[in-house]
């Protein structure tokens, strides 16, 4: 983490941002188990969790665009307030509450969730003084965020088991509001101002070919992640130990954490489109190997850890490219689009993997993950030239 500790305030900002983003790793499973408890139906709970995921994906680029125009503070504080209130209302609903109320509140939570991740990545170029260390800083940040995915789901489930599912959502809401408020109060966040550009025409960050390429890459990566989550659960069931799914997914996240730390020590991820394609090829190979390991818990644990080690370096490579890929004045929106692409891809991957696992077993679902990773690598390889080109300058609109 030397790339973060070398800049005053960078490490503190990263720690605060990780705390503020912890609820995002808690809410998907938290809303699912709470909705199941209130309705008695896993299908209805899936609708609630899906509504939240869709709303979160839609709102990210919209809120990112507002940040790029108005600054971070107001968007973060207002979003946290609305999301926190919606979570409190959801937690207070009684057993038998109508599904429409749960769905509506889940949509409000997703639409108002503060874009802390996109804001944090937008700030990194400002808080890391050494430009040569910026790529390593993205790698360190990508590794640090894995802590939320390792700890968030077990934490929300532990609170639900000890008290109630409503209490678990309430805790997530308190952490979200408090963590976001502390992040928004950080000097770097308060001082950040949008880039002075003549205009921001329709299309925003997606006007840049490089950004469209990165979005396609992360859409395919999302399919990898969604497929692996389902495949791991299916493999654990087939091995006779459903409870093993949690530790296996934890090893996946731990592998990513280690991979991010190693990438940070080595100066960050790939620096070119061709380099990104190579990183993605390694990710595809690692996740494809899970298909061969699906029949053994020991083999699966070893391979899922190695496969996970490619995730944070991939994210670090992509994030470091946004700074030159996104047109001026659209960087926060650009980072938000990447998060949306992963969320959409994960939903598609989970749905397809579920069907494959039922029809042909978990190895087929792991093969889907490997295939999606291969698609991501091919996209990066075929679009390497746009990835290496500077972002286009958005021209001002012609006078009427």
Image (cartoon, rainbow, N blue to C red):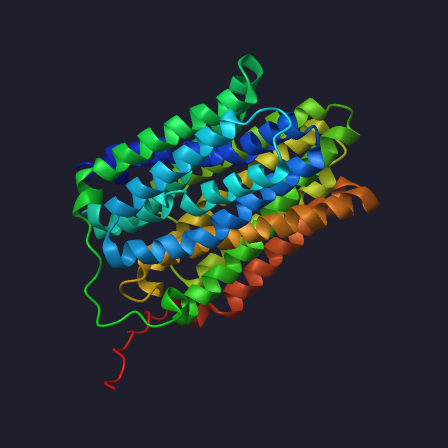
Q: Nearer the viewer, residue 198 or 47?
A: 47
Residue 258 in the image: state x and y as whole percent: 45, 34
- Left or right for 52, reference 133: right
Residue 361 in the image: state x and y as whole percent: 80, 41
Residue 382 in the image: state x and y as whole percent: 53, 70
Report the residue that reaches farthest toward the bottom: 400
Q: Nearer the viewer, residue 368 or 1?
A: 368
Q: Is residue 385 above or below residue 104?
A: below
Q: Residue 50's quadrant in the figure?
A: top right
Q: Residue 38's quadrant in the figure?
A: top right
Instruction: Tell me the quadrant of the picture where the C terminus can be found.
Output: bottom left
Residue 270 in the image: state x and y as whole percent: 41, 54
User: Residue at the spot x=23%, y=35% of the render?
Assistant: 5
User: Residue at the spot x=71%, y=50% of the render?
Assistant: 352
- Figure disc tally: 0
Q: Is residue 367 visible?
A: no
Q: Is residue 378 above or below residue 151?
A: below
Q: Residue 11's quadrant in the figure?
A: top left
Instruction: Tell me the quadrant of the picture where the N terminus can be found.
Output: top left
Report the residue that reaches farthest toward the right: 359
User: Residue at the spot x=22%, y=57% of the render?
Assistant: 194
- Left or right for 13, reference 278: left
């Amino acid at each position: 983490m030397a790339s973060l500790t070398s800049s005053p305030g960078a490490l503190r900002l990263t720690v605060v941002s990780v705390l503020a983003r912890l609820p995002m790793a808690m809410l998907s499973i938290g809303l699912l188990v709470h909705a199941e408890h209130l309705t008695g139906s896993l299908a209805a709970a899936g609708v609630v969790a899906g509504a939240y995921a869709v709303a979160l994906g839609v709102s990210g680029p919209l809120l990112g665009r507002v940040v790029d125009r108005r600054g971070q503070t107001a968007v973060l504080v207002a979003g946290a307030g609305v999301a926190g209130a919606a979570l409190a209302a959801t937690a207070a609903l009684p057993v038998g509450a109508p599904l429409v109320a749960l769905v509506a509140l889940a949509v409000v939570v997703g639409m108002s969730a503060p874009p802390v991740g996109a804001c944090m990545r937008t700030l990194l170029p400002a808080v890391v003084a050494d430009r040569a260390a910026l790529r390593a800083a993205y790698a360190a940040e990508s590794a640090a965020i894995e802590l939320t995915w390792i700890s968030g789901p077990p934490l929300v489930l532990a609170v639900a088991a000890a008290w109630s599912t409503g209490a678990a959502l309430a805790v997530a809401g308190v952490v979200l509001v408090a963590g976001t408020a502390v992040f928004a109060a950080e000097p770097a966040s308060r001082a950040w101002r949008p880039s002075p550009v003549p205009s921001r025409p329709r299309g925003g960050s997606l006007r840049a070919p490089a950004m469209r390429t990165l979005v396609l890459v992360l859409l395919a990566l999302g399919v990898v992640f969604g497929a692996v989550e389902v495949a791991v659960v299916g493999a654990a069931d087939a091995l006779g130990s459903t409870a093993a799914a949690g530790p296996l997914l934890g090893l996946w996240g731990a592998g990513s954490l280690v991979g991010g730390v190693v990438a940070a020590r080595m100066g960050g991820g790939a620096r070119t489109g061709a380099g990104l394609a190579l990183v993605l090829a390694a990710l595809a190979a690692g996740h494809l190997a899970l298909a061969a390991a699906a029949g053994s818990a020991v083999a699966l644990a070893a391979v899922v850890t190695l496969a996970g080690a490619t995730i944070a370096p991939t994210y670090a490579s992509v994030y470091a490219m946004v700074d030159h890929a996104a047109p001026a004045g659209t960087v926060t929106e650009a980072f938000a689009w990447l998060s949306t692409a992963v969320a959409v891809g994960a939903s598609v991957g989970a749905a397809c993997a579920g069907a494959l696992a039922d029809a042909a077993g978990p190895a087929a679902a792991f093969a889907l993950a490997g295939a999606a990773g291969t698609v991501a690598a091919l996209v990066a390889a075929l679009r390497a030239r746009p990835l290496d080109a500077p972002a286009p300058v958005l021209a001002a609109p012609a006078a009427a």
